[in-house]
Amino acid sequence: MLLQRVLAGPCRDVVASALVVVVGAALLAVPAARNWLFRALWAARIRRAWWRAWTDCELPRVRAGKVTAIPAGELMRVRASRGSSLDFVERRAEELAVCLQAREVRVARDTDNAATGTVTLVRRDPLAGMASVAWPNRGAEALSLWESIPVGIDELGETLAVSLPERNVLMGGEPGAGKSAALSVLVATAALDPSVKLWLLDGKLVELSVWAPCAERLAGPDIDEAIALLRDLRGQMEARYRELLARGKRKVTREDGLPLHLVACDELAFYLGSEDRKKQREFAELLRDLVARGRAAGVIVCAADPEAGLGRRAECLARSVRVPVGAAVQHAAGLGHDPRSGLGDARPQCGDDRARATRRGPTARRGRHAGADARVPPHRQRCRRAGSACDRPAR
């Protein structure tokens, strides 16, 4: 009876307030509830700042949704209102960055809905000062080249992977930018696949020599050896096509049980810049034939090409080889450097880190390939390091 009188009297509001305070204090004492509350308040603050930004920029309504913290800043889901588009928002990215006091604002629309997309508020460089990242498959006893290969970590903290079957890879950049280290990740995967036949072309003789026990053949800086290797490989490619014709197949699949051929070429410019023009032309034509016709036969070409030291003739030949390349990775080693090696006019703002790369062309994210689009912006990543030893016994 006493409790009913208290609740019915003027103390009712005081008791209700005290009860709310007690319940709130009890919830805050639970770490999970406290963290959820802090994240909700933080996300609400970001959404309010975004509302003020597009209002100040006099943009149509762009509603903010879920906000996620990433190493570079914040990732926010957005929806454009009727009569507007995310492309229009992207054109005002600089003004939005000023309003939000961010380094950069990136807008990307969804492929299945033009009204929705994501906005990345870049506030810091997560790759600056990052220690060397070990390759996750370094301790594996066996791998398959048919699976996606983790090659690095992007600035959103996600693992970037590339799928090699039916595709070729070209890595460009200045000397010392980490092309050979990135190429070793792909070579290491092939070396740990017992069914893959590995073919190595090493203009310096020391970068890929550690993988020689796992390779079918290794050609050093001798252009004649390199040409002979490519000739033998072309013969195997033609024999593979005859075998596919006998089986009634159009291309090699994983279920066929036929081995893949990985051709790893370091210092491509060395072979394309040979003093003997006839041998130079023959090497380029053989390599181009493998790149153009080898896809269905299970031949994969991965080449590293420095931007320096390319003569005019060699550069033309290199450009002819690059036409059918499916994925391009351009490396940079210095801040503000403009690494142009025929892979596009990319200007990555990287720190002094040899393992960073600016990616162009159809590359893979979590095993799925994006379409080949010249409008794909440069993508900064940190490549993983696979080490320099082959754990698979020699053949």
Image: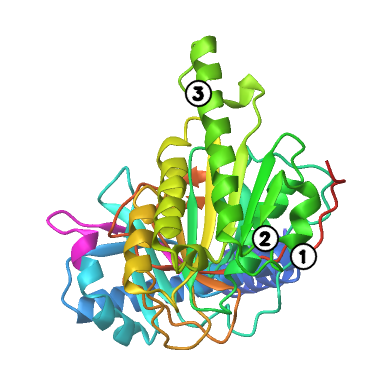
Residue 315 visible within the image: yes
Q: Which residue is mark 3?
A: 241
Q: Secondary structure at mark 3?
A: helix
Image x and y of residue 181, in percent = 65, 67
Which residue is rendered at x = 36% and y = 73% of the image? 346
What whole-number distance in Å separates the C-alpha atoms at marks 1 and 2? 8 Å
Q: Are marks 1 and 2 in contact (CB under 8 Å)?
A: yes
> Three-letter amino acid code at disc 1?
Gly
Q: CA distance from mark 2 to mark 3?
A: 29 Å
Amino acid type at circle 2 is: Ser
Q: Earlier in the sequence, mark 1 or mark 2?
A: 2
Query: Seen in the image, is 310 located left or right of residue 56?
Result: right
Measured Cα–Cα span from mark 3 to mark 1? 35 Å
Residue at 20 percent across and 57 percent down: it is 81
For residue 35, above or below residue 245: below
What's the magenta region? Answer: 75-88
Q: Is 35 in front, or is 120?
A: 120
- Classed neighbour count for the residue bearing mark 1: other residues with Cα under 10 Å, few (<14), some (14–19), many (≥20): few
Contact check, label 2 and label 3, Cβ < 8 Å: no
Viewer-proximal residue, 36 or 16?
Answer: 36
Which residue is pictured at 15% across the width and 59% down the height? Answer: 84
- Residue matched to label 2: 184
